[in-house]
Image: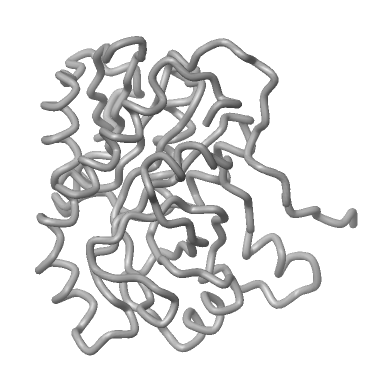
Amino acid sequence: MAAVQQSDAPLASTTDEKPISNIVIVIAMQTGGTTLLSINFELIEDPNSPFPEGVPWVRYHGKFKGLNLNLIWPGKDPSSGVDSVGTISSALVTYAAIQSFKPDLIINAGTAGGFKARGASVGDIFIASDCAFHDRRIPIPVFDLYGVGSRKAFETPNLVKELNLKVAKLSTGDSLDMTPQDESSITANDATVKDMEGAAVAYVADLLKVPAIFVKAVTDIIDGDKPTAEEFLQNLAAVTSALDLAVEQVINFIDGKCISEL
């Protein structure tokens, strides 16, 4: 069996020096993201979605300055009625969005838990430098590396400097809570923030060679003294508002620039 090599190069480098014109923004939850971003950029919901019939995925789109924006949300789960969070929905909708809109750049914007021991506070905005999984445990040589699936995010040193954003590694899993095994894997991933979709978006973007950046806002402190679910719900509205404003700043910075200028 051939060895599986994990990617340690940035997601999809490009020599294209044309200004970025087409951006897909992938969000996980409706709260905040589909409200402020759609208002700030005058995005409208597409009643004739290009996605397969029957899927709950939602597209908002519009033009902002020199950019064509597509805001994609996985929608509500048809069975339970809650936001379709997690890696499966995020991977599927990212793949479909790339196929439909051929973006120059993907922005995955979302909330995350943070570790105060590694410098995170509620409300902090991070740009992810690396994405990896912490709950795909396959204790077989090489398969273990595949399970972790570590990938570099697209580097944006000028954006980070201009907007004074924090940079940290991101770890992704399909559970809001954290088991001792998860914690051990997150520590091995050297992650400061933890979410439920980033590494899945990174996987698809890497496969299809589209540069992707990850903007994450901290809603809860994982190693704090409050229950994660309680703190997450308590801070969700305020933090998603801060996240939307940060994404607005990111998009304003990107306008008129090519990939290499980020």
Please, is residue 97 above or below residue 184 in the view? above
Foreground residue, 52 or 186? 186
Q: Position of residue 11 (x, y in %)?
A: 63, 39
Q: Position of residue 19 (x, y in %)?
A: 50, 13
- Relative horizontal placement of residue 76, taking residue 128 as reference (left or right): left
Please, is residue 24 above or below residue 20 in the view? below
Q: Position of residue 155 (x, y in %)?
A: 58, 42
Q: Position of residue 56 (x, y in %)?
A: 24, 35
Tell me, what colour scheme is on the image?
one colour
- Relative horizontal placement of residue 164, taking residue 221 as reference (left or right): right
Give the mark count.
0
Q: Quadrant of residue 222?
A: bottom left
Foreground residue, 112 or 179? 112
Foreground residue, 82 or 121? 121
Please, is residue 120 above or below residue 261 in the view? below
Q: Residue at x 35, y 24 (%)?
A: 52
- Relative horizontal placement of residue 93, taking residue 39 as reference (left or right): right
Q: Residue at x 49, y 64 (%)?
A: 171
Which residue is at the far right?
A: 1
Q: Residue at x 26, y 33 (%)?
A: 248
Please, is residue 20 above or below residue 132 in the view? above
Q: Quadrant of residue 23?
A: top left
